[in-house]
Image (spheres, rainbow, N blue to C red):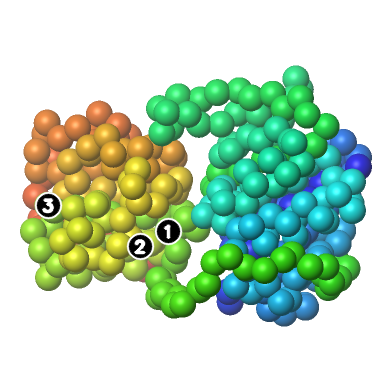
């Protein structure tokens, strides 16, 4: 029995979501006595791929700018060849586009956004209604497709030693042309961050964001913002978290000057711990918070920065 894991290994390092997905695939393979084949694409160095904890890696070197339909054909072809019973994706932008297509091509059941491994009854838990509830799903098809919600599965140490093969098939012609690529820049990508410092209109203007960035640096955190802040161009749009932005699940989410509208909460309510700073004691965010400070951000933030610096100095 073969388990296929699909991952995007492009970039300067292997993403945490890739390691989570591989961990998920290895656990499935251990439960059912199978092997793990990692499918990837792009120009990742041979040694980086070989260091991943899979039995085999198949890389499509010529598909660096492949669209989702090409990637779906690539995965389907290898899934049939490997006689895969499980196909695992990360529930990121690529996984959301490719996993449903692969499931349709293979007439396979799909769990999108899984947050657990199958239990003893074969049920998999996932979030529903923007994370306000959870459902247990049973896959009854011979081939099963699962996309794993980032930061849901703890990464386990990998032993490496995978064999690496080049994909020589034909995934067809791309129907999408990439005309421009804009990268988010330096720093911790939001979906990868374990700590996120986020702020809203309570910061009163982009000129005050230095306090937010300073706290994020001391906490080794990523920065984020609410939708109005991105819409007013105070911050870049890739930092917008919420229902219409990036959905994140960090270990700690610090919200500064954000009221906590339901659209924002939908993108962050999977956080392990939520801490809120707001001058309005009636702000809705306090109802969802594990910790809250009622106070002026311009008074509270310098004290938090000072405390974080002291903590770092004592380590």
Question: Which of the two labelled residues, at mark 3 and mark 2, occupies the earlier sequence position?
Answer: 3
| Picture quadrant where residue 74 is located | bottom right
Badge 3 element: helix
Tell whether label 1 touches label 2 (CB within 8 Å). Answer: yes
According to the picture, the residue beneath numbered tag 1 turns out to be 190
Question: Which of the two labelled residues, at mark 2 and mark 1, occupies the earlier sequence position?
Answer: 1
Badge 1 element: helix
Q: Is residue 54 left or right of residue 275?
A: right
According to the picture, the residue beneath numbered tag 3 turns out to be 202
Residue beneath the point at 81% across and 55% down: 77
Q: Is residue 43 above or below residue 57?
A: below
Residue beneath the point at 67% across and 60% down: 71
The crowd level at tag 2 (other Cα within 10 Å; few <14, some 14-19, many 20+) is some
According to the picture, the residue beneath numbered tag 2 turns out to be 238
Q: Which residue is nearer to you in this view: 169 or 9?
A: 169
Q: Is residue 157 left or right of residue 205?
A: right
Q: Position of residue 56 (x, y in %)?
A: 86, 62
Tell whether label 2 touches label 3 (CB within 8 Å). Answer: no
Q: CA distance from mark 3 to mark 2?
A: 20 Å
Q: Is residue 231 above or below residue 33?
A: below
């Amino acid at each position: 029995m073969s388990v296929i894991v699909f991952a995007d290994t492009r970039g300067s390092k292997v993403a945490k979501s890739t390691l989570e997905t591989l961990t998920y695939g290895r656990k499935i393979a251990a439960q059912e006595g199978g092997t793990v084949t990692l499918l990837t694409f792009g120009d990742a160095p041979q040694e980086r791929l070989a260091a991943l904890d899979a039995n085999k890696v198949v890389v499509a070197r010529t598909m660096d700018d492949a669209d989702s339909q090409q990637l779906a054909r690539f995965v389907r072809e290898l899934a049939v060849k490997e006689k895969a019973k499980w196909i695992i994706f990360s529930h990121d932008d690529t996984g959301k586009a490719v996993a449903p297509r692969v499931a349709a091509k293979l007439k396979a059941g799909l769990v999108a956004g899984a947050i657990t491994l199958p239990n003893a009854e074969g049920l998999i838990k996932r979030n529903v209604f923007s994370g306000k509830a959870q459902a247990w799903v049973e896959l009854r098809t011979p081939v099963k497709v699962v996309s794993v919600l980032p930061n849901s599965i703890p990464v386990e140490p990998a032993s490496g030693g995978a064999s690496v093969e080049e994909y020589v098939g034909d995934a067809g012609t791309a129907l999408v042309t990439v005309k421009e690529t804009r990268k988010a820049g330096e720093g911790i990508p939001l979906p990868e961050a374990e700590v996120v410092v986020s702020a809203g209109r309570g910061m009163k203007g982009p000129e005050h964001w230095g306090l937010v960035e300073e706290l994020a640096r001391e906490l080794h955190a990523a920065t984020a913002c609410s939708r109005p802040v991105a819409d007013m161009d105070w911050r870049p749009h890739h930092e917008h978290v919420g229902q219409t932005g990036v959905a994140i699940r960090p270990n700690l989410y610090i919200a500064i000057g954000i009221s906590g509208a339901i659209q924002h909460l939908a993108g962050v309510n999977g956080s392990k711990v939520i801490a809120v700073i707001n001058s309005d004691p009636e702000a809705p965010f306090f109802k969802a918070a594990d910790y809250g400070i009622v106070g002026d951000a311009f008074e509270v933030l310098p004290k938090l920065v000072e405390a974080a610096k002291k903590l770092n100095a004592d380590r």
